[in-house]
Amino acid sequence: MEDLLVPVYHKIRLPFPYIYDHYSSKKKEIGQSGYRLDLLLTTVQEYKNFLIGKQVKDKIEVLKKNLPRFLWIERVCETGKMEPRIDYVLDGTAIRPHRLVLIKYQ
């Protein structure tokens, strides 16, 4: 058996096992409906830059929203397609999974 150490910036306080448990339970729910769930870790700047080029419901309000520096994104996509349908945005600086905002793509 081998161990793997992955360095993580100390401001990302939400431990991977917690977010992975949250993600796994949501993935079971979504996976049976013709959709898939992806898990991403990003910064607020990278995420908002990504959203600028997308058609998002209430885009201006979302872009103005004050969010923490690090975000976990649980992204719902149709099976076999790359374009996102929904993003569940979670606080990467919290110690437990906490959803900040739900992004719906048009």
Image (cartoon, rainbow, N blue to C red):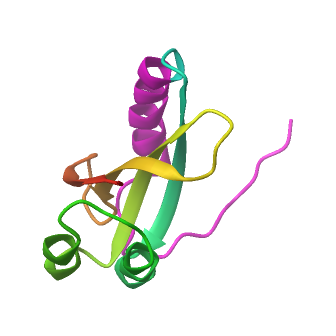
Q: How many marks?
A: 0
Q: 1 left or right of 81? A: right
**53 inside magenta stretch:** no
Give the residue drawn at x 42%, y 19%. Answer: 29
Q: Residue furthest top?
A: 32
Q: Is residue 49 above or below residue 31?
A: below
**14 inside magenta stretch:** yes
Give the residue drawn at x 13%, y 73%. Answer: 61
Residue 13, image quadrant = bottom left
Magenta span covers which residues? 1-30
Q: Is residue 58 above or below residue 84?
A: below
Give the residue drawn at x 38%, y 34%. Answer: 22
Towards the viewer: 68 or 84:
84
Q: Position of residue 80 (x, y in %)?
A: 69, 37
Quadrant placement of the C terminus: bottom left
Q: Residue furthest right?
A: 1
Quadrant placement of the N terminus: top right
Residue 25, image quadrant = top left
Q: Position of residue 71 (x, y in %)?
A: 36, 65
Q: 106 left or right of 4? A: left
Q: Position of residue 20 (x, y in %)?
A: 48, 39
Q: 87 left or right of 101? A: right
Q: Is residue 59 above or below residue 94?
A: below
Q: Position of residue 27 (x, y in %)?
A: 48, 28
